[in-house]
Image (tube, grey):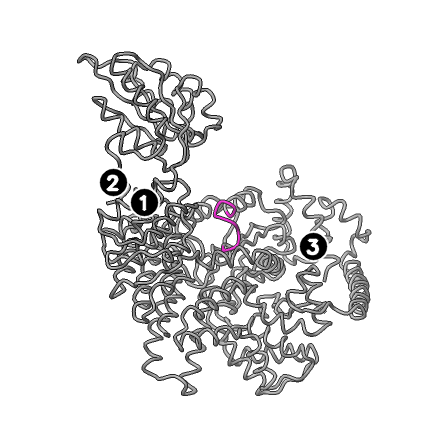
Amino acid sequence: MLWTDKYRPQTLDEVVGNNKEKKIILDWVGNWKKGNPQQPLLLVGPPGIGKTTLALVIAKEFSEYIELNASDKRSQDVIKSTIGESSSTRSLFGDEYKLIIMDEVDGIHGTNDRGGVKAIGEIIKNSKHPMILMANDFYSKRLQSIKPKCTVIKMKKVRSPSIRKALKEIAEKEEIKANPKALDLIAKKSNGDMRSAINTLQALADNDKVLEPRDVENLRIKDDRSDIFNAITGVLKSKNPQHVREALRVDEDPTTVMEYIAENIPREYTKKDEIKKAYENIAKADLYFGRARNSRNYGYWKYASDFMGIGVSSSKKETYKKFTKIQTPSTFTLLGRNRGKRNLRDGIAEKMSQKMHVSHAVAISMFPYLEIMFNNDELAWEISDFLELEQNEIKRFRKKAIPKKVINKMEKQKAQMRVEERDRRFEELQNQMMNAPKEVVEVLEEPVEEELPFEIPGIADEPLEEETEEVIEEEIPEEKEEKPKKKTDKQVSLFSF
Amino acid sequence: MSGPWVEKYRPQKLEDIVGQKQIITRLEKYVGEGSMPNLMFTGPAGVGKTTTALALVKSILGEYWRQNFLELNASDARGIDTVRDRIKNFCRLKPVGAPFRIIFLDEVDNMTKDAQHALRREMEMYTKTASFILSCNYSSKIIDPIQSRCAIFRFAPIKGEEIKERLQFICESEGFEADDEGLQTIVYFAEGDMRKAVNVLQAATSEGEAITEESVYEVVSKAKPQEIANMINKALIGDFLGARTLLRETMVLQGTSGEDMVTQIYQEVSKRVVEGKMEPDFYINLIESIADCDFRIREGANPSIQLEALLTKFI
């Protein structure tokens, strides 16, 4: 069980911090109880400071409560049908109020929640029941229309001495030995977020060992990775299947979680057999993720999840008594750091794939040979010319630029060959077109009428010629797009070699 | 004077294609008849699938083959939707100056099953105007409905003698001296892969010297990334983290594919056992793991994870 749930305050007094605000809330509850309807409460403040806890404590003062949060689809209809009804009608039995709790109001957005803000506005207007709305960002645009209709309570971060005190109490109840300085460090690093502080304590807690400040020092508590960090720590530090399962419930792509676990296995486990066993499990998890992807049967995920969770955690004989800094998979950082290099590589591969009828993978597999060939100045120029490589792409294969002398010489040769080739082609065409001795350029401009004489020498059989003629006549009116293309292609075939 | 020899010496006509005689004979019949069914070419890399497809297209479509021909690589075209859009747009137009249109789709085995099913519908929809040539390494990865719509041609690795002849022909045309052992060595390393053979040949001649056994060995060892051997050494002395870093760098920076990594790891360890640098028992256990890793990658697992797991077997 998560300690944040286990030790959630049950009364208003137990809620840590925000004493002034608590008083306002207490008055608000009192007035409702006396039968004085009040404006809804809007609790605004950063995560983990006790907004939900407060709402749940207040809920006990009322006969019933209804809860909605951001993970629900909050379209107008959903809101109206689930709480719209109950908000405008009162219970048949006397003065019993239902408390309506709505979490993360500023999270309403996008097409799924179309009309959500408007609907909340209407509910507020019509509601005969107490309502508590919660939001993180006071300045959110989505709160603009809601704020004037509510009693806004801005809640502050919990001060670190208060967090430290709470951590100490939990540690005592859980019989965790902890150096007070370590708790202090967790409290400070949590930056006013009680939930994150308690989660961290639970992740680091070890019954056999005193929690020391150095265990905490390298932690990066509370950033966007804090959840995945807890999950990985759970898998690597625990041998308890239930704990591992809970740890793996994170809001992350499971294959990303798998890569994090894989990354940190050899950092935590040091015995060879354990690394082997753990990695075997990771490989099996990966296999099932692959099968799930290929077959679109995501039911396989549960097996994958067990392999990478319980499988990896039980690969160790004993839990290591040391602190391991959980690290981001180096593949991610490698990918990020080398984007330029990879783009260059893929750009070359794309050019090769166009000119040489190969896939990127095959093109890349030819790179080592190209590197050798590029040692030769002339060959380097030829290949670069053939593939139309840019200067920086040439550098991928050879450090030195191709000498100017060589470039000039090769360009001259190429020009010479072009002239020769063109002359040869021209002669060939003239010979072919004995029946229609017109200029080539004219032929190109009038492809429709001049095509036939072109084809006669190429196609020996009479019937075939007739067929071709038919098709062309049939096509020409519709195939306007094709004409210009044909022209350019013919030009290419005339002048390239 | 035209860049890579693999392209310069790509046979342009069916009759010039090296090896695969039976297949060529059959395809020439299609050319004679002026029509062809959907075709599937399967076989390992560098045995002439693309070359045969291009040559067939040129002879069967005639002078206007370019206008009636679409070449797509299934593994590079971004997503099946792109492939389908391009096929659709291409097939909607009637053939011009040719009896029909041809779509050549390379590396179809890299398409997901869903994408293959979508492709199958495209194949049915345009039977009147277009024929398909599909190419793949493993026909087992192609769904049955597609296989049953194609005449399947299995390309075998090209025979050593035939590769040697072709290399000799290239050497003569380019004016390079080549001794018999030199060519024989290329043939040995190429393992029936003509593309590889021609690449090694051109790389070996790029130093301006004659082709000898030594010059070929030099090229082959230069072209082989040193990282694989280093990685295995690190793993063998128990430095798993170091080995894993090398593995990742090779894959991310060089862009080596998972399948190529497996092949190279295999070649490296099998060299070691032959040279007596590895115990046969240990080797055979490794082979089982390598084979398993190979199989899983082809089945669609994540290559880096599987290769990392393979590396643990060395420690």
As shown in the figure, which amino acid type bears the numbered disc 1?
Ile
Residue A367 located left or right of residue A426: left
Which residue position is annotated with label 2?
A7
Residue A239 lies in quadrant = bottom left
Q: Earlier in the sequence, mark 3 or mark 1?
A: 1
Q: Is residue A83 magenta?
A: no
Magenta stretch containing residue B81, yes or no? yes
The residue identified by callout 3 is A456
How far apart in space, not on screen, are marks 3 and 1 (Cα)? 87 Å
Can you say which quadrant of the picture contains the N terminus of chain A?
top left
Q: For mark 3, name the chain.
A: A
Q: Is residue A57 above or below residue A481?
A: above
Q: Is residue B19 left or right of residue A105?
A: right
Q: Which residues are magenta?
A: B75-83
Location of residue A279 in the rendering, given as x and y in whole percent from the top left corner: 34, 64
Q: Which mark is residue B13?
A: none
Helix or strand or loop: what does disc 3 sit on? helix
- Mark 3: give few (<14), some (14-19) or many (20+) Cα within 10 Å: some
Callouts 1 and 2 close, C-beta under 8 Å:
yes
- Foreground of the two, A342 or A357: A342
* Amino acid, disc 3: Ile
Q: How far is mark 1 from mark 2, CA to CA?
A: 9 Å
User: Disc 2 is attached to a residue of which chain?
Assistant: A
Q: Secondary structure at mark 2?
A: loop
In the image shown, does A413 or A271 lie closer to the viewer?
A271
Tell which tag, 2 or 3, sits nearer the viewer.
Answer: 2
Report the residue marked by disc 1.
A198
Image location (x, y in percent) of residue A430: 80, 58
Q: Residue at x 44, y 56 (%)?
A: A328
Mark positioned earlier in the residue sequence (1 or 2) = 2
